[in-house]
Amino acid sequence: MQSFGLFLNITTVNRTEIEKRISFLENMENLGHVEVWLEHGDWTDDDSRWLKKKLAGFKILVHAPFISFSFVATHREINEASLVALKRACEHAEMLGSKVMTLHVGRKPLYLLDEEARKIAISHLTSLVEYVDGKFDLAIENLPASSGTSLRYPVTLREVECIIQEVPHLKATVDVGHCIQNEDSYEWFFEKYATRISDIHVHNAIKKSKAHFGFGTPGDLDLQKFILFLNRISYGKYFTFEILGDKDIRESWDKLQAIIKE
């Protein structure tokens, strides 16, 4: 395993608040990387330069902003505006020295078939991959199923597969917790696309129910079994806990360290 890490959620530009979160992360034993979720729209170049200095001891990954963005809207203006904003996120990722930037493809209208959504998304994803030009891995994430007039896309790893097959330099971030929620098997994807997986998001989850909680609470993801699976296939990229709540994060991190040391 190359690196174990945790999320740093940038939903504020208040540096004092961000420094508190960094201090919490710095107390984690053997923390190899930090995945920075750059959601706040007022984030500046100066903020990125400051954050890079604050995280100088760690490798950095970036999770692109996704709230309100989509590459699968039927309104061309929404897709194009999302591309502009995500290109800006790529610029921040480069300034931060990011190794990977994970992004959500977005929400599609209920009436839009997956094949139609994929066709719309691929042109924008291709543009973004070309914009990054190999400076870091650009990876799309599988998402939890949803209901309503708009649906998250892609949900299953089969849908992820269909996209990355058509965009050769695009990678995948496999969210194993979302796989559990969706009752979507993931082993085959790791075995078939080992070289296309740049990051894993890991959190406990319950089938057809909640997720993003820690491993001190009963759930349907067996952390030890999952680590053994990754070791068996010689996974060598990034493993990132995406867990909410400091208590859950700390308990889960301690459990992870104990498993690694066995």
Image (cartoon, rainbow, N blue to C red):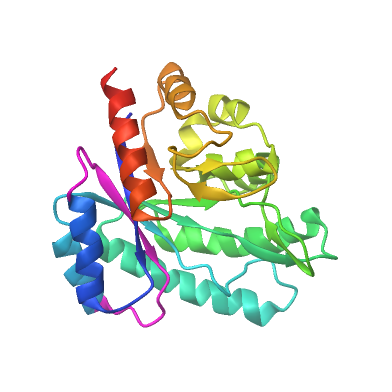
Q: Nearer the viewer, residue 79 or 244?
A: 244
Give coordinates of residue 256: x percent, y percent: 34, 32
Determine if the magenta segment contains residue 33. Answer: yes
Q: Is residue 40 magenta?
A: yes
Quadrant the N terminus occupies: top left
- Residue 1 vertical position relative to residue 62 in the rendered view, above or below: above
Q: Quadrant of the C terminus?
A: top left
Point out residue 160 in the picture as x, y percentages from the top left corner. Answer: 63, 45
Where residue 213 appears, as percent x and y from the top left, is 48, 48
140 left or right of 241 in image: right
Q: Is residue 95 visible?
A: yes
Residue span colored magenta: 27-45
Identity of the residue drawn at 54% across and 33% down: 221
User: Overall secondary structure of the magenta stretch?
Assistant: loop
Give x and y (percent) for residue 142: 60, 48
In this picture, is 251 found above or below 233? Answer: below
* Direction from residue 114 to residue 79 in the image, left or right: left
Quadrant housing residue 237: top left
**Outermost residue to the right:** 111
When the figure is inspected, residue 236 is found, relative to residue 113, above or below; the finding is above
Is any atom of residue 2 visible in this view? no
Residue drawn at point x = 64 percent, y = 51 percent: 144
